[in-house]
Image (cartoon, coloured by chain):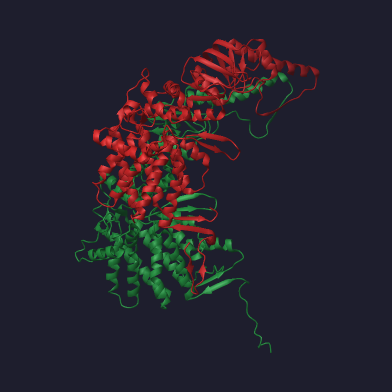
Chain colours: A red, B green
């Protein structure tokens, strides 16, 4: 902090605890910020693309996560630097908005910062660099729209959707069964989508996992899987054409919330109380029976007495089902959640074709499947996998795939992957740069160079010669005027991404460019960092 | 003999630090200048941002003068005055907070050599006051009124003002987009002083262009109970009932206790309780009955919904009549980023607006919100006072020229002082150039020449931030409301005079924090410090 001096040349304090403040300003601040941003990008760079590597992260309490998902890596890294935090947020917001491309956006921002550093060294004003980037990002944004394709699909022809989801999954550890996982994701999204409003509520897709089995056993269930078992071991394990009573009240004598007290002074009174209580249980079970329920699902627990009675009356029951699951069950079976026994009516029962309890392997784990539901607006993806880490990573990968499918339902435009879109944008931006007078021209050209970073990283991660490969592809794009040439990561033998069927969503790509530009602009605009020395 | 050992007369408590006279006045000025230097670089469209950590680890990235001053946590008593004027400018007009600090710093800087030369501060104060009055009159004279224009014209004019404010902020790249959004929002709420009717909701994710304006109310999906997902998600022409009681089973007030002597009556109590809630439900809604409900809406949002839909907030479910229900055209639950939003649009009274802001990072959105707040304030101000002046330093140069001219007609010391006041005003164009990396002296000379043209046609010329030359700000639509400038000059002059009028500081070290606050409020509260002002100029001699 700048010190002020009094008439005797002694410094005096203006700010609170001034001695402890550190201050970085001007070019130094920008350079420090840029190198922080670049460091984050460097970590993620190797995770990009189908041949990208995974990261292993250990949390303070010893949990290990192995992942390839940019947002997850950054989230778990627990960075401390403020600028690095901005990069984390950048990837998080890509995750919120699009769900996929979280690595790409950080790599892109890192490349932009790297280019900006060179320009700063030449003495270009940071804001002019930021403005140039902004112009360039708009050019790229529009160019993407030009090279994008509309992809027609409907409920019967889901192939295009599956292809796009496969591109997303190919970079993950689960790529060995990407086809089946992609199909599961697409079917799940289509089941819950409101195609008219183009709205997909991903809350209605439940992703459940269980360690054991193989990844190939992962399945989509048009219904709900609940990690619970029947309340009594002797209850039937399979119910066909079940009528389900969904209760949010316990199988217990009701308790008024007002404080109450029952005075019992004689043996008779005690007897009546006992009978009363028993009668409650009896009535409850009877009420369920009366409306024709063949299965009771309850949010709360039941007394042993009730359990016994239910067993006795041959009414299977499930207890302690969570609120969210209860809701999904209600949606899936078309039933109503009933808060009180007196409210039960036959119309409020949910219907399911098959309810069964399934045991897994040699363990005693059991789960309840509710299938063939009246209304399949709620679905479950049930993942199996060798160990917990694979399971978790599969969940994250599926989440990405689900988001991609959702984005395509919202906007069915796609661009081609494999870095082809970036290369094409880079060419377009480079060409447009010459039309801008002023210093911004340099920034726009730098932006074009930064766009090359993604295909470059792709090539590098795939073990190809980055510069040679990139320049070859770029030349091919210009020569053939073909926007669909990308990096051949899987060594298939063609650079044409149309033949390789590598797609990404248009909005995802556009979002990447816009978000990266935005954050870089914010970082460039800071010329003064004031902090307490603790940081 | 005792006269030989004259006892020292102790007036003040031990440890009290007093300093007085000219040197301490100079050091107060130094402190203020140091503070002004901090915000200096944030001025103008090429201004930079500051990143500030506090001890708690919170980080703010901002370009807004008032925000930065607030976060700096200044303890120097004289420098605190600058924080106060930045705050008051913020609450009074909402924008120009950097300008006001810069002005005050510059006035003091110009005064410093005079003080050192032995000029009495009161002389300076008097001249500064006269100069500020003259300057304000001149601004009023130069201001162009936009009153009486049609709504369309007004909208575009207000948009220009908002765009000028926004151009210096992080969201400057999209200034037209946001300016029109702000103008629409402000016009929607009408002329009443109800700023809280414009809600700003922040949703991380997406890019700036995904931000949108809802002509009604929007809020994040709130708490929901089981069964929520089964409710319909879209209504056309819904009737809305607003309640601020809970629809829950509730134990009767306080510690009511029921004593039962007959166990058979048990059921009757349970029934009684349930009946209460059924009564409530029958009168309104529940998931089971195909009615949408949103629970735990914040008070602020509830008020806004009430204003938008014309409904009245009810505290009881008894006696709900048609008149208290609100209406709107469409109600919808929509996905925004990772959140689901409840949106009421097409409201009949149209007295509310909600801006949903999107952006890449939390800090980004925070800063965008502050910028929009500035823009909203500016548009509201412009709507009320409806006079604008040319920005880009043009108005400052013109006043400066006018004051110089005026000074020549005055005999005596005052001439010098008013001249230096005029010079201080040039700080705005100079800083604009410095921040943009242009040669300030060069540009300033061009501007002076232009403004000195006898025909007066050069008056609207200001700094051209794109080329490094000069341009007609008025024609380029770099406009700001006159009231911003008037208030800035007023506040800065007052602050400068206040600092100049202090000639003694008494610091009591023991109850430092309590006194510090008291002194700060006294400084802020008084506005103009008379001769009797006993400030605590300096005295933080810790070393």
Image quarter (top left, top right, bottom left or bottom right) of the N terminus of chain B? bottom right
Rendered position, B5 above or below A387: below
Q: Residue at x 52, y 34 (%)?
A: A66
Q: Nearer the viewer, residue B295 or A333?
A: A333
Q: Position of residue A91 (x, y in %)?
A: 44, 39
Rendered position, A335 above or below A18: above
Residue B211 visible? The answer is no
Q: Residue at x 43, y 40 (%)?
A: A45
Image quarter (top left, top right, bottom left or bottom right) of the C terminus of chain B? bottom right
In the picture, measured across the screen, residue A486 lies left or right of residue B263, that is: left
Q: Position of residue A528 (x, y in %)?
A: 43, 56
Rendered position, A491 above or below A132: above
Q: Position of residue A173 (x, y in %)?
A: 48, 29
Residue extending furthest toward the bottom: B1
Q: Nearer the viewer, residue A448 or B521?
A: A448
Q: Position of residue B448 (x, y in %)?
A: 26, 65
Residue B365 visible? The answer is yes
In the picture, measured across the screen, residue B391 lies left or right of residue B6, that is: left
Q: Nearer the viewer, residue A397 or A335?
A: A397
């Amino acid at each position: 902090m700048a010190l002020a001096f009094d008439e005797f040349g002694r410094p005096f304090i203006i700010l609170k605890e001034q001695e402890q403040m550190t201050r970085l300003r001007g070019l130094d601040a920008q350079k420090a910020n840029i190198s922080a941003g670049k460091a984050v990008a460097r970590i993620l760079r190797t995770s990009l693309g189908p041949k990208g590597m995974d990261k292993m992260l250990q949390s303070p309490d010893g949990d290990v996560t192995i992942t390839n998902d940019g947002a997850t890596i950054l989230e778990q890294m627990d960075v401390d630097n403020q600028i690095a935090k901005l990069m984390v947020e950048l990837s998080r917001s890509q995750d919120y908005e699009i769900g996929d491309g979280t690595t790409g956006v950080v790599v892109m921002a890192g490349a932009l910062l790297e280019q900006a550093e060179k320009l700063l060294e030449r003495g270009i004003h940071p804001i002019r660099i930021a403005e140039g980037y902004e112009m360039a990002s708009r050019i790229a944004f529009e160019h993407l729209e030009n090279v994008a394709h509309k992809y027609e699909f409907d409920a019967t022809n889901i192939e295009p959707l599956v292809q796009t989801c496969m591109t997303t999954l190919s970079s993950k550890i689960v790529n060995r069964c990407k086809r089946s996982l992609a199909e599961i994701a697409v079917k799940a999204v289509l089941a819950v989508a409101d195609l008219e409003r183009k709205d997909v509520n991903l809350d209605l897709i439940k992703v459940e996992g269980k360690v054991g089995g193989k990844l190939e056993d992962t399945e989509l269930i048009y219904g709900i899987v609940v990690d619970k078992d029947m309340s009594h071991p002797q209850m039937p394990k399979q119910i066909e054409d079940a009528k389900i009573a969904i209760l949010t009240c316990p199988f217990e004598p009701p308790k008024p919330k007002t404080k109450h007290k029952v005075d019992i002074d004689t043996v008779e009174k005690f007897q009546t109380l006992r009978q009363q209580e028993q009668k409650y249980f009896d009535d409850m079970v009877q009420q369920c029976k009366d409306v024709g329920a063949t299965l009771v699902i309850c949010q709360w627990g039941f007394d042993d007495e009730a359990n016994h009675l239910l067993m006795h009356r041959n009414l299977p029951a499930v207890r302690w089902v969570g609120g969210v699951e209860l809701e999904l069950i209600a949606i899936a079976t078309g039933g109503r959640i009933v808060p009180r026994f007196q409210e039960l009516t036959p119309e409020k029962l949910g219907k399911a074709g098959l309810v069964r309890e399934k045991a897994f392997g040699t363990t005693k784990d059991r789960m309840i499947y509710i299938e063939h539901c009246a209304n399949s607006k709620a679905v479950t993806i049930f993942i199996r996998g060798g160990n917990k880490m694979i399971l978790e990573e599969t969940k994250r990968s599926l989440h990405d795939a689900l988001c991609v499918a959702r984005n395509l339902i919202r906007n069915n435009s796609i661009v081609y992957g494999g870095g082809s879109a970036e290369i094409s944008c880079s060419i377009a931006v480079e060409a447009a740069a010459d039309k801008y007078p002023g210093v911004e021209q340099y920034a726009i050209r730098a932006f074009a160079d930064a766009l090359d970073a993604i295909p470059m990283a792709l090539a590098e991660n795939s073990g190809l010669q980055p510069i040679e490969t990139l320049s070859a592809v770029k030349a091919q794009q210009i020569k053939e005027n073909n926007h669909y040439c990308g990096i051949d990561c899987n060594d298939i033998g063609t650079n044409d991404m149309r033949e390789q069927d590598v797609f990404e969503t248009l909005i995802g790509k556009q979002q990447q460019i816009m978000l990266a530009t935005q954050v870089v602009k914010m970082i460039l605009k800071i010329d003064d960092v004031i902090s307490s020395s603790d940081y | 003999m005792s006269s030989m050992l004259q006892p020292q007369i102790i007036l003040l408590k031990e440890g009290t630090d007093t300093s007085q006279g000219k040197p301490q006045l100079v050091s107060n000025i130094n402190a203020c200048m140091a503070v002004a230097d901090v915000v200096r670089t944030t001025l103008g469209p090429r201004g930079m941002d500051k990143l500030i950590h506090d001890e708690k680890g919170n980080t703010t990235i901002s370009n807004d003068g008032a925000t930065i001053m607030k976060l700096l946590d200044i303890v120097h008593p004289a420098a605190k005055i600058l924080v106060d004027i930045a705050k008051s400018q913020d609450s009074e007009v909402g924008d120009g907070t950097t300008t006001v600090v810069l002005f005050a710093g510059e006035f003091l800087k110009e005064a410093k050599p005079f003080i050192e030369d032995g000029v009495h501060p009161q002389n300076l104060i008097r001249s500064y006051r006269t100069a500020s009055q003259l300057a304000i009159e001149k601004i009023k004279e130069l201001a162009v009124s936009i009153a009486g224009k049609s709504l369309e014209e007004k909208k575009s004019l207000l948009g220009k003002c908002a765009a000028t404010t926004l151009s210096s902020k992080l969201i400057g790249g999209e200034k037209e987009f946001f300016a029109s959004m702000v103008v629409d929002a402000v016009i929607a709420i009408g002329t009443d002083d109800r700023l809280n009717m414009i809600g700003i909701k922040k949703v991380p994710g997406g890019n700036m262009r995904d931000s949108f304006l809802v002509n009604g109310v929007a809020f994040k999906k709130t708490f929901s109970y089981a069964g929520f997902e089964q409710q319909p998600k879209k209504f056309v022409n819904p009737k809305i009932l607003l309640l601020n009681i809970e629809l829950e089973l509730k134990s009767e007030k306080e510690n009511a206790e029921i004593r039962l002597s007959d166990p058979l009556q048990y059921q009757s109590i349970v029934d009684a309780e349930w009946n209460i809630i059924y009564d409530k439900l029958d009168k309104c809604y529940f998931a089971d009955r195909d009615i949408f409900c949103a629970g735990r809406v914040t008070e602020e949002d509830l008020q806004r919904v009430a204003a938008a839909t014309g409904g009245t907030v009810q505290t009881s479910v008894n006696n709900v009549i048609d008149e208290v229900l609100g209406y709107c055209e469409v109600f919808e639950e929509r996905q925004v980023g990772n959140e689901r939003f409840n949106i009421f649009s097409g409201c009949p009274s149209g007295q509310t607006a909600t801006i949903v802001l999107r952006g890449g990072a939390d800090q980004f959105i925070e800063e965008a919100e502050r910028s929009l707040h500035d823009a909203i304030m500016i548009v509201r101000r412009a709507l009320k006072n409806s006079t604008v002046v040319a920005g880009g330093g043009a108005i400052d140069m013109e006043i400066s020229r006018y004051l110089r001219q005026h000074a020549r007609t005055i005999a005596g010391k005052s001439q010098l002082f008013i001249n230096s006041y005029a010079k201080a005003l040039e700080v705005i164009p100079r800083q604009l150039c410095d921040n943009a990396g242009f040669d300030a002296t060069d540009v300033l000379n061009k501007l002076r020449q232009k403004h000195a043209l006898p025909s007066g046609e050069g008056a609207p010329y200001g700094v051209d931030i794109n080329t490094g030359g000069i341009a007609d700000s008025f024609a380029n639509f770099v406009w700001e409301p006159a009231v911003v400038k008037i208030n800035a000059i007023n506040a800065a002059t007052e602050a400068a005079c206040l600092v100049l009028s202090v000639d003694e500081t008494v610091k009591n070290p023991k109850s430092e924090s309590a006194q510090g606050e008291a002194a700060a409020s006294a400084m802020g509260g008084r506005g103009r410090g008379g001769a009797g002002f006993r400030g605590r100029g300096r005295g933080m001699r810790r070393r």
